[in-house]
Amino acid sequence: MRKIVVIGAGVGGLAAAARLAAAGHRVEVHERAAVTGGKLGVHERDGFRFDTGPSLLTLPRVFDDLDLGLRPEPLDPVVRHVFADGTVLDSSSSHGIFLERIGTAFGRDAATDWDRFWRRAARIWQASWDSVLQRPVTAASLARLSWRLGDLAAIAPGRTLRGLARHYLRDPRLRMLLERYATYTGADPRRAPAALAAIPYAELTHGGWYLPGGLGTLGDALHARCVSSGVRVKLGSEVTAIEADTAVRGVRLASGEFVPADVVISNVDAVTLYRDLLPTPQRLTALADRSLAGFVMLLGVRDREPGSGRETALAHHTVFFPGHYDAEFDAVFGSASRRARPADDPAIFVTRADDPAVHPEGHESWFVLVNAARHGTARSAVDWRRPGLADAYAGHLLDVLARRGLDVRDRLVFAETRTPADLADATGAPGGAIYGTAGGLVRPSNRGPVPGLFLVGGSAHPGGGLPMVTLSARIVADAIGPA
Ligand SMILES: Cc1cc2nc3c(=O)[nH]c(=O)nc-3n(C[C@H](O)[C@H](O)[C@H](O)COP(=O)(O)OP(=O)(O)OC[C@H]3O[C@@H](n4cnc5c(N)ncnc54)[C@H](O)[C@@H]3O)c2cc1C
């Protein structure tokens, strides 16, 4: 039995702690915030309950062996896409149904294109799943991997997601739909690798899911699993340093207390870990771009009066696309000629759960998300703490939504915002970046630079998003092994 300290109670930290306690180790989690869950946040107000982070659960089978008692409900459509020209396309986890819907919305050629693309996406997914996502990959080991030639050709190193979209899809709306998946890893589709086509494939083949009560219930279930497995979870307990000689010795808390450990698992953002917590600070090299961030609105909304006018019907998830998608990426990533800024006309993602557990009767809880530049003062960031900016941008987005066919302005009970600066404060994510490092196949390794130190979570291999951080916990727990 080894004494293991986990720094951070995000999904990755909790999943690793639960696994290792079940494997017989003595595990202690130190979380700087007053709550567990990290980016998987929940906000409650006047009977409204909001997920402030994830709203779409994919690959739920990844959680099966944690035995969390989850009852995911499949979504149909997985996402409703509303385009600037008024066309609507509902995605489906049945490939046949989705092809029919594409045919009806965009014509038969578009459906044929998607079908061809889908065969390629299947090969990309299989190659990624087998060779990358479930293994402890590093840049060197990835290069050494004896890729089967077919797999290597499938993931098309050197090609971007945009390049892949242009190669297979003639309809600009389908291209937009595919390119949006780059932002699921925080990346710009114009630079992100074609391998990200694995994401829509995983989402639409294995389905998009909702957890009754909201996705925050996943965090609660993980916390409960930790406690029932004997993990000690300490809240309000910030780790300020990892102490080591030839191997880790333990962690130092903000209170000054030293907590000895045989193994330390960091759920802290990898850049922060290397820069601030190691005995000898290091710069992470060969990082892909930092991920984009998100601007969130939490809206308490009165039900619409029956017959009170026409508006776009919301599905559980609805995305409203702009006419000119590139302008959004120019704004949130900045460019050589212009600094980053809030996007004027971004894609707007609305989540509205048809679940009485998350709103008072006669009302709805809306989570609205747009891509945003990270918080900061660099050219590639926006100072989200500038007085008045968040409220002004929220008002602007509600106007944009109204122009796109969904006017919620006279039904608001309240509107709250969560900027990238707020996410940085709440979870320690540098600049409020949602996914740590963006897009690439190679992320910081799950093994730290000191023996006995491991990394879990969205900024380490295999990446961000609930299923990936849970896979990172599995990779780390397997590397440490049973007591
Ligand atoms: C707006 C938004 C929307 C998203 N949508 C989706 C979605 O629809 N589907 C999906 O799958 N994913 C989504 N994600 C991504 C998903 O939430 C994350 O990838 C995942 O929750 C990250 O988990 P993690 O293990 O990396 O830990 P994090 O959530 O990053 O948690 C890290 C924890 O470590 C703690 N910590 C940091 N430093 C210290 C320290 N020094 N001492 C002690 N504790 C410390 C933090 O307080 C935090 O609790 C979304 C995220 C956001 C923000």
Image (cartoon, rainbow, N blue to C red):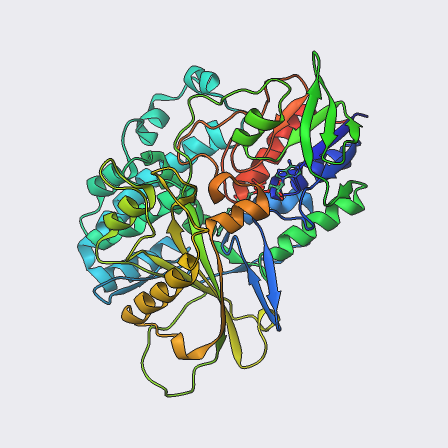
226 vs 56: above or below: above
At x 42%, y 67%, the residue is: 315
Picture quadrant where residue 287 is located:
top left
Front residue (pair 118, 258) = 258
Identify the image quadrant of the C terminus: top right
421 vs 254: above or below: below
Front residue (pair 271, 147) = 271
Residue 477 in view: no
**In the image: residue 333, left or right of residue 443:** left
Q: Quick one: which residue is furthest to the front in this view?
A: 387
Front residue (pair 220, 234) = 234
**In the image: residue 8, left or right of residue 415:** right
387 vs 222: above or below: below
Identify the image quadrant of the N terminus: top right
x, y percent for residue 117: 28, 43
x, y percent for residue 61: 57, 46
x, y percent for residue 95: 36, 53
Front residue (pair 7, 280) = 280
Picture quadrant where residue 256 is located:
top right
Picture quadrant where residue 313 is located:
bottom left
At x 68%, y 25%, the residue is: 242
At x 31%, y 53%, the residue is: 343
